[in-house]
Image (cartoon, rainbow, N blue to C red):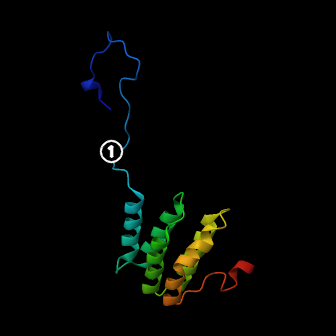
Amino acid sequence: YRSVSHRIDLSGVHRQTPLASRCYSHAKVETDEEFDARWVTYFSKPDIDAWELKKGMNTLIGYDLVPEPKILDSALRACRRLNDLASAIRILEAVKDKSGPHKDIYPYLIQELQPTLIELGISTPEDLGMDKL
């Protein structure tokens, strides 16, 4: 919007629409593909540390969405590079919780992640009996 020093005198002009609309952000809107690629890149950093992994997952889970399998794949591989099985299981628990009442999302994600889980030797919370607690 314009500052006071740049105002134009329109007192004699009849108008039906507001003079100016405020734009609070000039940032480009990120597409779904760009969003996914950004997070895959974030978790794929070879030197990611445990703090960055947890911060990234907390931020990601804070969004109003369930992460795509390729993002979760990247995060689980980061857990493996850090030798952090507990974080991998927490990620799966968080995704299950984030799926909420949509009972078909979590099984779909596990199905899509199954090759990665097998390759990395990661058990699901259900395999560990944690869903029975």
For residue 19, above or below residue 60: above
Q: Secondary structure at mark 1?
A: loop
Q: Residue at x 51, y 84 (%)?
A: 115
Residue 133, visible in the rendered structure: no
For residue 91, above or below residue 27: below
Q: Is residue 103 left or right of residue 22?
A: right
Q: Amino acid at mark 1?
A: His
**Residue 127 in picture, x, y percent from top left:** 65, 86
Q: Quadrant of the N terminus?
A: top left
**Residue 72 in picture, x, y percent from top left:** 49, 74
Furthest toward the top, the residue is 12
Residue 57, visible in the rendered structure: yes
Q: Residue at x 34, y 81 (%)?
A: 46
Q: Residue at x 38, y 34 (%)?
A: 22
Tell me the residue that label 1 is attached to.
26
User: Residue 86's quadrant in the figure?
Assistant: bottom right
Q: How many marks?
A: 1
User: Residue 26's quadrant in the figure?
Assistant: top left
User: Residue 35's quadrant in the figure?
Assistant: bottom left
Furthest toward the left, the residue is 6
For residue 112, above or below residue 101: below
Pick the front one: 2 or 99: 99
**Residue 111 in picture, x, y percent from top left:** 57, 78
Q: Quadrant of the C terminus?
A: bottom right
Q: Residue at x 36, y 44 (%)?
A: 25
Q: What crowding class fits label 1: few (fewer than 14 Cα within 10 Å), some (14-19), or many (20 or more)? A: few
Pick the front one: 92 or 101: 101
